[in-house]
Image (cartoon, rainbow, N blue to C red):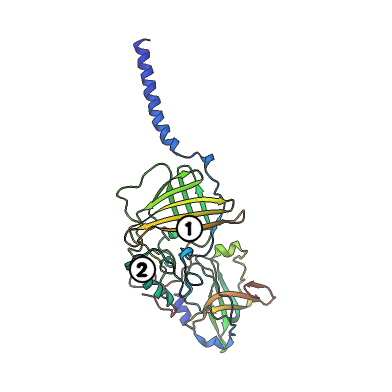
Amino acid sequence: MTRNLRTVLGMCAGLLLMLGLSYGQVAFLTPFDKLPDWSGAWSMTGGTVFDRASQTGQGGALATGVREHPPYNAEWEAKYQKNLALRDQARFPDVVTNCGVPAGFPRMFNLPDPYEFAVRPEEVWILAENGPNVMRIYTDGRKHLEDQWETYTGDSVGHWEADTLVFTTIALKGSRDGDSILDRTGLILSDKAHATTRMRKTNATTIEVQMTIEDSKALTKPWVVTKQFQKMAAGTRLYDYGCAENNRNPVDEKTGETLTLGPDGKPLK
Amino acid sequence: MTLVNRLGIAMLAVAALTVIIPNAVPTALAHHSGVEFDTSKVVEITGTIKEFQFKNPHTWIQVMVPNGKGGTVEWSLEWGSPNSLGRQGVRPTTFPVGAKATLRINPMRTGAPGGAFVGAKFEDGKTVGQWN
């Protein structure tokens, strides 16, 4: 073998090694034809009480006496009870009615109106007509940023375990700024909340989302909440949701803040 | 003009035209909390459709209702989102401008001329929403 030939073979080996590394990254992705079919329109079942498994009291989130029982510590249980008392007086404002902020996570999985779940090898999009709200889950092998700042929906990265999408969500601002709740009972989490979510199709017409939520400020132990989504009729259309299109909530002329009205027709604040 | 201002123009002048129907099914509202509406009551009003605002986050039916003094009062009735209603077959033409109808609503707690839409019956007998 001549020296030149050895040089060429060495370059080829290097090139193959480079391609191999590159392929290794691509190989992390689940091929499109191996991904589950989550196509169509989906509707959350069971109403908008976030954790129905721990619910006490009869009715929906606005019904007097209805509450959930997350493993709150005493401080956050007191915060929740304060919100519940306001809810019982019909004076607990839901900020999303101002059409100005996203629902955020985990409320993202607690919305009325249809959903779509767009699945690609590198990313999954949770698309909620209500809001509208969008959640992005990166499945391309990237990691959470170490210096990720907090947002309503946070940062989600995940991977596929067979037909189950497993992802972690961090960097949630929670109730820190008073504009993010889990449901209209007044359920809240702190800016230390994070979650591991397992999402899978349990049968042809059901998708189950199981969230294990941890919050060192608010919870004494992990809180597991399961939501289910039912497939809607074939051909169901989703539409845009311009929340400000005909939002009749009045605006404070001095501050520009959109106001939420109480039962007496006056702003809640 | 805000809803509050508009509704503040006329208050209970038309109350004499209304009928209270107990134990009615409350209207489900997805976007707003609905606390401004008294879902324990259903009131009937009769008037002429001025406008059907088929817009998000909620549709609004504007109805001109005689006030018993020779004039009319504009009522604002909130219904579901155009998206969900559209999937159930409701269209912007469902409430034609100028049509006369009797409408059942959960009234505003403040007594202002407005409420949450429950159902309607037009002069020709056609019904919309929860009527029976």
Give percent across and percent down for residue A86. 40, 75
Which of these two is toward me, A102 or A88? Answer: A88
**Who's the residue at 38% across and 64% down the image?**
A188
Which callout, 2 or 1, points at the residue further toward the start of the chain?
2
On residue A49, the disc is none
On screen, A179 above or below A28?
A: below
Residue A248 in view (yes/no): yes
Q: Residues within 10 Å of mark 2 (few under 14, many from 20)?
A: some
Which of these two is toward me, A173 or A256? Answer: A173
On screen, A194 above or below B131?
A: above
- Residue type at the position of mark 1: Thr
Quarter of the picture holding the N terminus of chain A: top left
- Residue type at the position of mark 2: Glu
Left or right: A88 in relation to A146 = right
Provide the residue designation for mark 2.
Answer: A77
Provide the residue designation for mark 1.
Answer: A226
**Who's the residue at 60% across and 61% down the image?**
B87
Give percent across and percent down for residue B73. 53, 82
